[in-house]
Image (cartoon, rainbow, N blue to C red):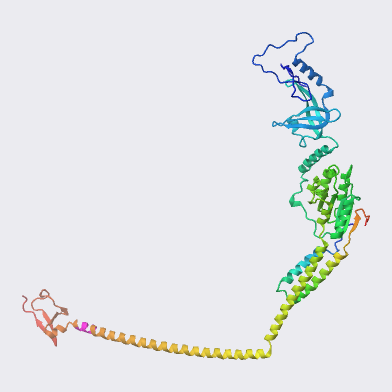
Amino acid sequence: MAKKAPVQATLSFDESESGSAFSFISPVKDPNPLPKKEPESPGIITVSELGERIRDVLDCELLTGITVTGEVTGYRPNSSGHLYFSLTEKGDIDAAVSCVMWKYAAKHLAFPLKDGLAVNITGHVDYYPPSGRMQFIVKKIEPASGGKTGLYLQKEMWKKQLEAEGVIPRPESEKRDPPLFPKCVGVVTSRTGSVLQDIRNVLSRRYPLPVLLAPAQVQGAGAEVSIVSAIESLQGKVDVIIVARGGGSFEDLFVFNHPDVVRAIRRSRVPIISAVGHETDTTLSDFASDRRVPTPSAAAETVVPDRTVLLNNLEEYRRRMHDRARGIISTNRSAVAELKMRVDPSRLSRRLDMMHQQTADIEERIKSAFSRKLKAEADGLEQLAERIFKGAKTRISTAVLELSAQKEKILSCDPKKPLERGYALVQMNGTVIRSKEQLKKDDSLTLCLSDGEVTAIVEKIS
Amino acid sequence: MTEIEANEPNYEEMISELREIARKLDNPNTSVEEAVKLHTRGMELISKCEAFLAKAELTITEVHGEQTE
Protein backbone atom coordinates (compact mmCIF):
# COMPACT_ATOMS: atom_id res chain seq x y z
CA MET A 1 0.00 0.00 0.00
CA ALA A 2 1.38 3.38 -1.00
CA LYS A 3 2.20 5.62 1.86
CA LYS A 4 0.99 9.17 1.77
CA ALA A 5 3.14 12.06 2.93
CA PRO A 6 1.92 13.55 6.20
CA VAL A 7 -0.33 16.52 5.76
CA GLN A 8 -1.52 19.14 8.14
CA ALA A 9 -5.09 18.57 9.30
CA THR A 10 -7.26 19.43 12.22
CA LEU A 11 -9.17 17.03 14.39
CA SER A 12 -12.71 18.18 14.96
CA PHE A 13 -16.04 17.04 16.28
CA ASP A 14 -18.35 16.67 13.26
CA GLU A 15 -22.02 16.10 14.01
CA SER A 16 -22.91 15.80 10.32
CA GLU A 17 -21.27 12.37 10.04
CA SER A 18 -23.78 9.86 11.28
CA GLY A 19 -22.49 6.75 12.86
CA SER A 20 -19.18 8.19 13.95
CA ALA A 21 -18.43 10.86 16.47
CA PHE A 22 -15.01 11.85 15.18
CA SER A 23 -13.76 12.27 11.68
CA PHE A 24 -10.88 13.90 9.93
CA ILE A 25 -11.83 16.88 7.84
CA SER A 26 -10.09 18.37 4.84
CA PRO A 27 -6.77 20.11 5.28
CA VAL A 28 -7.11 23.67 6.40
CA LYS A 29 -5.84 26.08 3.79
CA ASP A 30 -4.84 28.98 5.98
CA PRO A 31 -3.55 31.97 3.99
CA ASN A 32 -1.13 32.63 6.85
CA PRO A 33 -0.18 29.18 7.95
CA LEU A 34 1.34 28.81 11.33
CA PRO A 35 4.58 26.94 11.70
CA LYS A 36 4.10 23.14 11.92
CA LYS A 37 3.08 22.28 15.41
CA GLU A 38 5.65 20.16 17.13
CA PRO A 39 4.62 17.68 19.79
CA GLU A 40 4.62 19.38 23.12
CA SER A 41 6.11 16.39 24.81
CA PRO A 42 7.13 12.80 24.09
CA GLY A 43 4.07 10.53 23.56
CA ILE A 44 2.01 13.20 21.84
CA ILE A 45 1.72 12.83 18.02
CA THR A 46 0.40 14.96 15.19
CA VAL A 47 -2.73 14.19 13.18
CA SER A 48 -0.71 13.21 10.15
CA GLU A 49 1.35 10.84 12.26
CA LEU A 50 -1.89 9.32 13.52
CA GLY A 51 -3.02 8.91 9.89
CA GLU A 52 0.21 7.16 9.04
CA ARG A 53 -0.19 4.83 11.98
CA ILE A 54 -3.79 4.01 10.96
CA ARG A 55 -2.68 3.19 7.40
CA ASP A 56 0.10 1.00 8.75
CA VAL A 57 -2.38 -0.88 10.89
CA LEU A 58 -4.89 -1.29 8.04
CA ASP A 59 -2.23 -2.60 5.65
CA CYS A 60 -2.47 -6.11 6.98
CA GLU A 61 -3.62 -9.48 5.68
CA LEU A 62 -6.71 -9.31 7.81
CA LEU A 63 -8.07 -6.28 5.93
CA THR A 64 -6.81 -6.87 2.37
CA GLY A 65 -8.21 -9.28 -0.24
CA ILE A 66 -11.31 -9.86 1.84
CA THR A 67 -14.91 -10.38 0.79
CA VAL A 68 -17.70 -8.75 2.74
CA THR A 69 -21.42 -9.38 2.34
CA GLY A 70 -24.09 -6.78 2.91
CA GLU A 71 -26.72 -4.55 1.35
CA VAL A 72 -26.03 -1.62 -0.91
CA THR A 73 -27.26 1.73 0.43
CA GLY A 74 -26.61 5.34 -0.49
CA TYR A 75 -25.48 4.39 -3.97
CA ARG A 76 -23.96 7.46 -5.68
CA PRO A 77 -22.43 6.93 -9.12
CA ASN A 78 -20.03 9.76 -9.94
CA SER A 79 -19.91 11.36 -13.35
CA SER A 80 -16.23 10.45 -13.48
CA GLY A 81 -17.21 6.78 -13.48
CA HIS A 82 -16.33 6.00 -9.86
CA LEU A 83 -19.08 4.35 -7.79
CA TYR A 84 -19.70 5.36 -4.15
CA PHE A 85 -21.99 3.50 -1.79
CA SER A 86 -22.26 2.05 1.67
CA LEU A 87 -22.42 -1.62 2.49
CA THR A 88 -24.76 -2.07 5.40
CA GLU A 89 -26.01 -4.79 7.65
CA LYS A 90 -29.26 -4.61 9.54
CA GLY A 91 -29.69 -6.77 12.53
CA ASP A 92 -29.11 -6.81 16.22
CA ILE A 93 -26.12 -4.62 15.59
CA ASP A 94 -26.40 -2.24 12.66
CA ALA A 95 -23.16 -1.72 10.77
CA ALA A 96 -22.04 0.15 7.71
CA VAL A 97 -18.88 0.76 5.77
CA SER A 98 -18.21 3.41 3.12
CA CYS A 99 -17.19 1.89 -0.19
CA VAL A 100 -15.76 3.16 -3.43
CA MET A 101 -15.30 1.26 -6.67
CA TRP A 102 -12.92 3.07 -8.96
CA LYS A 103 -13.78 3.51 -12.60
CA TYR A 104 -11.29 0.90 -13.84
CA ALA A 105 -12.96 -1.76 -11.67
CA ALA A 106 -16.51 -0.49 -12.17
CA LYS A 107 -16.38 -1.01 -15.93
CA HIS A 108 -16.22 -4.78 -15.35
CA LEU A 109 -19.40 -4.75 -13.24
CA ALA A 110 -21.82 -7.22 -14.85
CA PHE A 111 -25.05 -5.76 -13.49
CA PRO A 112 -26.44 -2.36 -12.53
CA LEU A 113 -25.87 -1.49 -8.91
CA LYS A 114 -28.75 -0.06 -6.91
CA ASP A 115 -29.83 0.39 -3.33
CA GLY A 116 -31.17 -2.66 -1.59
CA LEU A 117 -29.14 -5.22 -3.50
CA ALA A 118 -27.46 -7.94 -1.49
CA VAL A 119 -23.91 -8.25 -2.71
CA ASN A 120 -20.52 -9.67 -1.87
CA ILE A 121 -17.75 -7.13 -2.33
CA THR A 122 -14.08 -8.02 -2.54
CA GLY A 123 -11.26 -5.55 -1.94
CA HIS A 124 -9.33 -3.95 0.90
CA VAL A 125 -9.78 -1.35 3.63
CA ASP A 126 -7.99 1.92 3.18
CA TYR A 127 -7.68 5.17 5.05
CA TYR A 128 -7.46 8.54 3.37
CA PRO A 129 -5.73 11.05 5.68
CA PRO A 130 -6.75 14.25 3.82
CA SER A 131 -10.42 13.56 4.53
CA GLY A 132 -9.85 11.40 7.55
CA ARG A 133 -12.16 8.81 6.00
CA MET A 134 -11.79 5.09 6.20
CA GLN A 135 -13.32 3.26 3.23
CA PHE A 136 -13.47 -0.06 1.49
CA ILE A 137 -11.82 -0.06 -1.93
CA VAL A 138 -13.96 -2.44 -4.00
CA LYS A 139 -12.30 -4.50 -6.71
CA LYS A 140 -15.19 -6.86 -7.49
CA ILE A 141 -18.90 -7.13 -6.75
CA GLU A 142 -20.95 -10.29 -7.08
CA PRO A 143 -24.56 -11.05 -6.22
CA ALA A 144 -24.88 -12.50 -2.73
CA SER A 145 -25.94 -16.12 -2.91
CA GLY A 146 -29.59 -16.72 -2.08
CA GLY A 147 -32.22 -14.12 -1.50
CA LYS A 148 -34.27 -12.22 -4.04
CA THR A 149 -31.73 -9.48 -4.61
CA GLY A 150 -29.01 -11.97 -5.34
CA LEU A 151 -31.24 -13.80 -7.77
CA TYR A 152 -32.20 -10.53 -9.37
CA LEU A 153 -28.55 -9.75 -10.01
CA GLN A 154 -27.97 -13.26 -11.27
CA LYS A 155 -30.84 -12.79 -13.71
CA GLU A 156 -29.37 -9.51 -14.91
CA MET A 157 -25.99 -11.17 -15.46
CA TRP A 158 -27.56 -14.05 -17.40
CA LYS A 159 -29.59 -11.61 -19.43
CA LYS A 160 -26.47 -9.72 -20.49
CA GLN A 161 -24.68 -12.96 -21.22
CA LEU A 162 -27.54 -14.36 -23.35
CA GLU A 163 -27.97 -11.09 -25.18
CA ALA A 164 -24.26 -11.09 -25.98
CA GLU A 165 -24.61 -14.63 -27.35
CA GLY A 166 -27.57 -13.54 -29.50
CA VAL A 167 -29.86 -16.05 -27.79
CA ILE A 168 -32.30 -13.37 -26.65
CA PRO A 169 -34.34 -11.63 -27.69
CA ARG A 170 -35.60 -13.91 -30.47
CA PRO A 171 -35.99 -11.63 -33.52
CA GLU A 172 -39.57 -11.07 -34.67
CA SER A 173 -38.61 -12.51 -38.06
CA GLU A 174 -37.64 -15.78 -36.39
CA LYS A 175 -40.82 -16.16 -34.36
CA ARG A 176 -42.75 -19.10 -35.75
CA ASP A 177 -46.52 -19.48 -35.68
CA PRO A 178 -47.80 -22.80 -34.37
CA PRO A 179 -49.73 -24.81 -37.00
CA LEU A 180 -53.41 -23.94 -37.31
CA PHE A 181 -54.50 -27.53 -36.73
CA PRO A 182 -51.82 -29.33 -34.72
CA LYS A 183 -51.95 -33.09 -34.59
CA CYS A 184 -50.05 -33.42 -31.36
CA VAL A 185 -49.13 -30.90 -28.66
CA GLY A 186 -46.11 -31.29 -26.41
CA VAL A 187 -46.20 -30.01 -22.85
CA VAL A 188 -43.23 -29.43 -20.59
CA THR A 189 -44.39 -29.01 -17.02
CA SER A 190 -44.69 -30.75 -13.70
CA ARG A 191 -46.46 -34.09 -13.75
CA THR A 192 -48.36 -32.98 -10.68
CA GLY A 193 -49.99 -29.65 -10.06
CA SER A 194 -52.78 -27.72 -11.67
CA VAL A 195 -50.97 -26.61 -14.82
CA LEU A 196 -51.41 -29.87 -16.69
CA GLN A 197 -55.01 -30.02 -15.52
CA ASP A 198 -55.67 -26.50 -16.78
CA ILE A 199 -54.19 -27.34 -20.18
CA ARG A 200 -56.13 -30.60 -20.31
CA ASN A 201 -59.42 -28.82 -19.55
CA VAL A 202 -58.94 -26.20 -22.24
CA LEU A 203 -57.85 -28.73 -24.89
CA SER A 204 -60.78 -31.04 -24.03
CA ARG A 205 -63.21 -28.20 -24.46
CA ARG A 206 -61.71 -26.60 -27.56
CA TYR A 207 -59.97 -29.24 -29.64
CA PRO A 208 -59.23 -32.63 -28.10
CA LEU A 209 -56.01 -34.09 -29.46
CA PRO A 210 -53.09 -36.20 -28.35
CA VAL A 211 -50.88 -34.50 -25.81
CA LEU A 212 -47.32 -35.66 -25.25
CA LEU A 213 -46.20 -34.77 -21.76
CA ALA A 214 -42.54 -34.34 -20.97
CA PRO A 215 -42.61 -34.15 -17.18
CA ALA A 216 -40.12 -31.75 -15.70
CA GLN A 217 -39.05 -30.43 -12.36
CA VAL A 218 -39.98 -26.76 -12.59
CA GLN A 219 -38.19 -25.39 -9.52
CA GLY A 220 -35.38 -26.20 -7.17
CA ALA A 221 -31.91 -27.53 -7.64
CA GLY A 222 -31.36 -29.32 -10.96
CA ALA A 223 -34.64 -28.07 -12.43
CA GLU A 224 -32.82 -26.57 -15.41
CA VAL A 225 -31.41 -29.97 -16.38
CA SER A 226 -34.87 -31.50 -16.14
CA ILE A 227 -36.50 -28.80 -18.27
CA VAL A 228 -33.79 -28.90 -20.95
CA SER A 229 -34.08 -32.68 -21.13
CA ALA A 230 -37.87 -32.45 -21.43
CA ILE A 231 -37.68 -29.93 -24.29
CA GLU A 232 -35.11 -32.05 -26.12
CA SER A 233 -37.21 -35.20 -25.70
CA LEU A 234 -40.16 -33.65 -27.58
CA GLN A 235 -38.23 -32.58 -30.68
CA GLY A 236 -39.68 -34.14 -33.86
CA LYS A 237 -42.59 -35.72 -32.01
CA VAL A 238 -45.02 -32.83 -31.69
CA ASP A 239 -46.20 -29.81 -33.71
CA VAL A 240 -45.88 -27.27 -30.92
CA ILE A 241 -44.54 -27.25 -27.36
CA ILE A 242 -45.99 -25.50 -24.34
CA VAL A 243 -43.43 -24.80 -21.61
CA ALA A 244 -45.58 -24.02 -18.61
CA ARG A 245 -45.44 -23.40 -14.92
CA GLY A 246 -48.06 -22.05 -12.55
CA GLY A 247 -47.74 -18.81 -10.67
CA GLY A 248 -45.12 -18.48 -7.99
CA SER A 249 -42.59 -16.19 -6.44
CA PHE A 250 -39.65 -14.74 -8.29
CA GLU A 251 -37.50 -17.44 -6.72
CA ASP A 252 -39.99 -20.17 -7.71
CA LEU A 253 -39.87 -19.11 -11.35
CA PHE A 254 -36.15 -18.44 -11.33
CA VAL A 255 -35.09 -21.59 -13.18
CA PHE A 256 -36.80 -20.24 -16.30
CA ASN A 257 -34.07 -17.60 -16.39
CA HIS A 258 -31.34 -20.21 -16.44
CA PRO A 259 -29.17 -19.93 -19.58
CA ASP A 260 -29.41 -23.66 -20.30
CA VAL A 261 -33.21 -23.48 -20.33
CA VAL A 262 -33.24 -20.30 -22.41
CA ARG A 263 -30.81 -21.76 -24.94
CA ALA A 264 -32.82 -24.99 -25.20
CA ILE A 265 -35.95 -22.97 -25.98
CA ARG A 266 -34.14 -20.86 -28.57
CA ARG A 267 -32.71 -23.85 -30.45
CA SER A 268 -35.93 -25.89 -30.41
CA ARG A 269 -36.91 -27.02 -33.92
CA VAL A 270 -40.54 -26.97 -32.80
CA PRO A 271 -42.32 -23.67 -32.03
CA ILE A 272 -42.44 -23.07 -28.27
CA ILE A 273 -45.11 -21.21 -26.34
CA SER A 274 -43.86 -19.90 -23.01
CA ALA A 275 -46.45 -19.80 -20.22
CA VAL A 276 -44.56 -19.33 -17.00
CA GLY A 277 -46.17 -17.76 -13.96
CA HIS A 278 -48.73 -15.02 -14.30
CA GLU A 279 -49.09 -12.08 -16.64
CA THR A 280 -46.83 -9.83 -14.56
CA ASP A 281 -44.01 -12.36 -14.40
CA THR A 282 -41.34 -12.19 -17.04
CA THR A 283 -38.53 -14.70 -17.36
CA LEU A 284 -35.68 -14.86 -19.84
CA SER A 285 -37.38 -17.92 -21.38
CA ASP A 286 -40.12 -15.59 -22.60
CA PHE A 287 -37.59 -13.69 -24.71
CA ALA A 288 -36.35 -16.88 -26.40
CA SER A 289 -39.73 -18.44 -27.12
CA ASP A 290 -41.81 -18.03 -30.26
CA ARG A 291 -44.70 -16.63 -28.27
CA ARG A 292 -45.28 -15.68 -24.68
CA VAL A 293 -48.71 -16.02 -23.10
CA PRO A 294 -49.73 -15.04 -19.57
CA THR A 295 -51.01 -18.40 -18.31
CA PRO A 296 -50.93 -22.13 -19.15
CA SER A 297 -54.65 -21.95 -20.02
CA ALA A 298 -53.94 -19.17 -22.48
CA ALA A 299 -51.20 -21.31 -23.99
CA ALA A 300 -53.66 -24.15 -24.58
CA GLU A 301 -56.08 -21.70 -26.21
CA THR A 302 -53.28 -20.38 -28.40
CA VAL A 303 -52.14 -23.71 -29.81
CA VAL A 304 -55.51 -25.12 -30.89
CA PRO A 305 -58.59 -23.76 -32.66
CA ASP A 306 -62.07 -23.93 -31.13
CA ARG A 307 -63.91 -27.03 -32.30
CA THR A 308 -67.30 -25.29 -32.03
CA VAL A 309 -66.15 -22.55 -34.34
CA LEU A 310 -64.75 -25.14 -36.76
CA LEU A 311 -68.05 -27.03 -36.84
CA ASN A 312 -69.93 -23.80 -37.48
CA ASN A 313 -67.50 -23.04 -40.28
CA LEU A 314 -68.11 -26.46 -41.81
CA GLU A 315 -71.86 -25.89 -41.65
CA GLU A 316 -71.33 -22.58 -43.40
CA TYR A 317 -69.26 -24.34 -46.08
CA ARG A 318 -72.05 -26.88 -46.55
CA ARG A 319 -74.70 -24.17 -46.94
CA ARG A 320 -72.52 -22.13 -49.27
CA MET A 321 -71.70 -25.11 -51.49
CA HIS A 322 -75.38 -26.12 -51.71
CA ASP A 323 -76.32 -22.57 -52.66
CA ARG A 324 -73.58 -22.19 -55.24
CA ALA A 325 -74.15 -25.64 -56.80
CA ARG A 326 -77.92 -25.04 -56.92
CA GLY A 327 -77.27 -21.64 -58.45
CA ILE A 328 -75.09 -23.09 -61.19
CA ILE A 329 -77.61 -25.86 -61.93
CA SER A 330 -80.47 -23.38 -61.96
CA THR A 331 -78.61 -21.07 -64.30
CA ASN A 332 -77.88 -23.93 -66.65
CA ARG A 333 -81.51 -25.14 -66.54
CA SER A 334 -82.64 -21.69 -67.59
CA ALA A 335 -80.13 -21.73 -70.43
CA VAL A 336 -81.39 -25.13 -71.59
CA ALA A 337 -85.02 -23.97 -71.44
CA GLU A 338 -84.20 -20.95 -73.51
CA LEU A 339 -82.37 -23.06 -76.07
CA LYS A 340 -85.31 -25.44 -76.23
CA MET A 341 -87.67 -22.59 -76.90
CA ARG A 342 -85.39 -21.24 -79.58
CA VAL A 343 -85.31 -24.55 -81.48
CA ASP A 344 -89.15 -24.99 -81.36
CA PRO A 345 -90.49 -25.87 -84.99
CA SER A 346 -93.20 -23.20 -85.06
CA ARG A 347 -90.64 -20.69 -83.84
CA LEU A 348 -88.31 -21.96 -86.55
CA SER A 349 -91.04 -21.57 -89.25
CA ARG A 350 -91.67 -18.02 -88.14
CA ARG A 351 -88.00 -17.48 -88.19
CA LEU A 352 -87.79 -18.84 -91.76
CA ASP A 353 -90.67 -16.63 -92.90
CA MET A 354 -88.99 -13.70 -91.39
CA MET A 355 -85.75 -14.66 -93.07
CA HIS A 356 -87.58 -14.95 -96.44
CA GLN A 357 -89.06 -11.53 -95.93
CA GLN A 358 -85.70 -10.17 -94.99
CA THR A 359 -84.16 -11.75 -98.09
CA ALA A 360 -86.83 -10.25 -100.33
CA ASP A 361 -86.39 -6.88 -98.75
CA ILE A 362 -82.68 -7.04 -99.25
CA GLU A 363 -83.12 -8.11 -102.88
CA GLU A 364 -85.47 -5.20 -103.50
CA ARG A 365 -83.13 -2.82 -101.85
CA ILE A 366 -80.25 -4.10 -103.97
CA LYS A 367 -82.24 -3.76 -107.20
CA SER A 368 -83.44 -0.30 -106.34
CA ALA A 369 -79.99 0.78 -105.37
CA PHE A 370 -78.53 -0.68 -108.59
CA SER A 371 -81.12 1.12 -110.69
CA ARG A 372 -80.41 4.39 -108.96
CA LYS A 373 -76.77 3.82 -109.49
CA LEU A 374 -77.19 3.12 -113.23
CA LYS A 375 -79.31 6.21 -113.72
CA ALA A 376 -76.79 8.28 -111.89
CA GLU A 377 -74.03 6.85 -114.04
CA ALA A 378 -76.00 7.56 -117.28
CA ASP A 379 -76.77 11.10 -116.16
CA GLY A 380 -73.14 11.57 -115.42
CA LEU A 381 -72.10 10.32 -118.84
CA GLU A 382 -74.61 12.58 -120.59
CA GLN A 383 -73.38 15.59 -118.73
CA LEU A 384 -69.82 14.63 -119.51
CA ALA A 385 -70.59 14.28 -123.26
CA GLU A 386 -72.33 17.66 -123.24
CA ARG A 387 -69.35 19.22 -121.59
CA ILE A 388 -66.97 17.58 -124.09
CA PHE A 389 -69.10 18.72 -127.05
CA LYS A 390 -69.34 22.28 -125.79
CA GLY A 391 -65.66 22.33 -125.05
CA ALA A 392 -64.72 21.02 -128.50
CA LYS A 393 -67.04 23.47 -130.22
CA THR A 394 -65.58 26.40 -128.37
CA ARG A 395 -62.09 25.20 -129.10
CA ILE A 396 -62.80 24.82 -132.87
CA SER A 397 -64.28 28.31 -133.12
CA THR A 398 -61.28 29.72 -131.39
CA ALA A 399 -58.94 27.80 -133.75
CA VAL A 400 -60.79 29.07 -136.86
CA LEU A 401 -60.51 32.64 -135.68
CA GLU A 402 -56.84 32.17 -134.83
CA LEU A 403 -56.23 30.60 -138.28
CA SER A 404 -57.95 33.49 -140.08
CA ALA A 405 -55.90 36.00 -138.15
CA GLN A 406 -52.70 34.12 -138.90
CA LYS A 407 -53.69 33.95 -142.57
CA GLU A 408 -54.16 37.71 -142.71
CA LYS A 409 -50.92 38.16 -140.97
CA ILE A 410 -49.11 35.88 -143.37
CA LEU A 411 -50.77 37.41 -146.37
CA SER A 412 -49.76 40.86 -145.25
CA CYS A 413 -46.16 39.71 -145.18
CA ASP A 414 -46.12 38.50 -148.83
CA PRO A 415 -43.17 40.30 -150.54
CA LYS A 416 -44.99 40.41 -153.83
CA LYS A 417 -48.04 42.12 -152.44
CA PRO A 418 -46.56 45.66 -152.87
CA LEU A 419 -45.86 44.79 -156.52
CA GLU A 420 -49.59 44.96 -157.10
CA ARG A 421 -49.48 48.58 -156.07
CA GLY A 422 -46.78 49.35 -158.71
CA TYR A 423 -43.60 48.60 -156.84
CA ALA A 424 -40.87 46.43 -158.42
CA LEU A 425 -38.40 44.09 -156.77
CA VAL A 426 -34.86 44.60 -158.04
CA GLN A 427 -32.53 41.62 -158.09
CA MET A 428 -29.17 40.88 -159.58
CA ASN A 429 -27.93 37.37 -159.82
CA GLY A 430 -30.57 36.31 -157.27
CA THR A 431 -29.59 39.05 -154.76
CA VAL A 432 -32.10 41.72 -153.80
CA ILE A 433 -30.68 45.15 -154.53
CA ARG A 434 -31.38 47.60 -151.78
CA SER A 435 -28.82 50.30 -152.56
CA LYS A 436 -27.24 52.00 -155.62
CA GLU A 437 -23.92 51.18 -154.04
CA GLN A 438 -24.48 47.57 -155.03
CA LEU A 439 -24.59 48.54 -158.71
CA LYS A 440 -22.38 49.85 -161.48
CA LYS A 441 -23.03 50.80 -164.98
CA ASP A 442 -24.11 48.03 -167.37
CA ASP A 443 -25.10 45.63 -164.65
CA SER A 444 -27.94 43.38 -165.73
CA LEU A 445 -30.89 43.63 -163.40
CA THR A 446 -34.01 41.56 -163.02
CA LEU A 447 -37.15 43.59 -162.22
CA CYS A 448 -39.96 41.57 -160.69
CA LEU A 449 -43.42 43.03 -161.37
CA SER A 450 -46.78 41.80 -160.19
CA ASP A 451 -47.40 39.94 -163.35
CA GLY A 452 -43.85 38.92 -164.46
CA GLU A 453 -40.15 39.75 -164.70
CA VAL A 454 -38.23 42.25 -166.86
CA THR A 455 -34.52 42.33 -167.50
CA ALA A 456 -32.91 45.83 -167.47
CA ILE A 457 -29.40 47.33 -167.95
CA VAL A 458 -27.98 50.03 -165.70
CA GLU A 459 -27.14 53.04 -167.75
CA LYS A 460 -26.52 55.69 -165.23
CA ILE A 461 -26.04 55.85 -161.46
CA SER A 462 -26.68 59.17 -159.84
CA MET B 1 -47.10 -41.86 -29.45
CA THR B 2 -43.66 -41.62 -30.90
CA GLU B 3 -43.52 -39.87 -34.28
CA ILE B 4 -46.21 -38.00 -36.17
CA GLU B 5 -47.65 -40.38 -38.76
CA ALA B 6 -47.62 -38.93 -42.24
CA ASN B 7 -50.73 -40.80 -43.49
CA GLU B 8 -53.15 -39.58 -40.84
CA PRO B 9 -55.97 -37.35 -42.11
CA ASN B 10 -54.69 -33.83 -42.30
CA TYR B 11 -57.43 -31.48 -41.24
CA GLU B 12 -55.59 -28.44 -42.54
CA GLU B 13 -55.27 -29.96 -46.03
CA MET B 14 -58.95 -30.85 -46.07
CA ILE B 15 -59.93 -27.32 -45.07
CA SER B 16 -57.60 -25.93 -47.70
CA GLU B 17 -59.25 -28.08 -50.37
CA LEU B 18 -62.69 -27.04 -49.13
CA ARG B 19 -61.74 -23.38 -49.52
CA GLU B 20 -60.60 -24.03 -53.08
CA ILE B 21 -63.83 -25.88 -53.91
CA ALA B 22 -65.90 -23.02 -52.48
CA ARG B 23 -63.89 -20.55 -54.53
CA LYS B 24 -64.49 -22.50 -57.75
CA LEU B 25 -68.20 -22.82 -56.99
CA ASP B 26 -68.36 -19.05 -56.53
CA ASN B 27 -67.28 -18.66 -60.14
CA PRO B 28 -70.45 -18.41 -62.31
CA ASN B 29 -68.52 -19.77 -65.29
CA THR B 30 -67.99 -23.13 -63.62
CA SER B 31 -69.69 -25.82 -65.73
CA VAL B 32 -72.51 -27.92 -64.36
CA GLU B 33 -70.45 -31.11 -64.59
CA GLU B 34 -67.63 -29.47 -62.66
CA ALA B 35 -70.04 -27.97 -60.12
CA VAL B 36 -71.60 -31.36 -59.44
CA LYS B 37 -68.18 -32.94 -58.99
CA LEU B 38 -67.03 -30.12 -56.72
CA HIS B 39 -70.20 -30.29 -54.66
CA THR B 40 -69.86 -34.04 -54.20
CA ARG B 41 -66.21 -33.71 -53.17
CA GLY B 42 -67.03 -30.79 -50.88
CA MET B 43 -69.75 -32.71 -49.05
CA GLU B 44 -67.38 -35.63 -48.68
CA LEU B 45 -64.69 -33.40 -47.18
CA ILE B 46 -67.13 -31.70 -44.82
CA SER B 47 -68.30 -35.08 -43.57
CA LYS B 48 -64.71 -36.17 -43.05
CA CYS B 49 -63.88 -32.99 -41.17
CA GLU B 50 -66.97 -33.32 -38.98
CA ALA B 51 -66.14 -36.93 -38.28
CA PHE B 52 -62.58 -35.92 -37.44
CA LEU B 53 -63.79 -33.32 -34.96
CA ALA B 54 -66.47 -35.61 -33.54
CA LYS B 55 -64.16 -38.48 -32.82
CA ALA B 56 -61.26 -36.32 -31.65
CA GLU B 57 -60.33 -37.12 -28.11
CA LEU B 58 -57.74 -35.98 -25.70
CA THR B 59 -55.03 -38.40 -24.71
CA ILE B 60 -52.13 -37.56 -22.51
CA THR B 61 -49.08 -39.71 -22.96
CA GLU B 62 -45.77 -39.25 -21.32
CA VAL B 63 -42.90 -38.86 -23.69
CA HIS B 64 -41.28 -42.03 -22.43
CA GLY B 65 -44.38 -44.08 -23.26
CA GLU B 66 -46.55 -44.07 -20.19
CA GLN B 67 -50.15 -43.12 -20.98
CA THR B 68 -51.65 -41.21 -18.10
CA GLU B 69 -55.20 -40.93 -19.44
> In the shown orientation, is residue A460 left or right of residue A118?
left
Q: Magenta part mainly helix, strand or loop?
A: helix
Residue B4 x/y as whole percent = 86, 59
Q: Quadrant of the N terminus of chain A?
A: top right
Q: Which residue is painted at 77% across and 16% down in the image?
A: A50
Q: Quadrant of residue A36?
A: top right
Q: Nearer the viewer, residue A52 or A197?
A: A197
Question: Does residue B53 appear in the picture of this structure?
Answer: yes
> Outermost residue, front direction?
A15
Residue A55 x/y as whole percent = 78, 20
Question: Does residue A184 appear in the picture of this structure?
Answer: no
Residue A138 x/y as whole percent = 78, 29
Residue A100 x/y as whole percent = 76, 28
Q: Is residue A394 above or below residue A315?
A: below
Q: Is residue A305 above or below residue A101?
A: below
Magenta stretch bounds: A406-411
Q: Is residue A437 above or below residue A396?
A: above
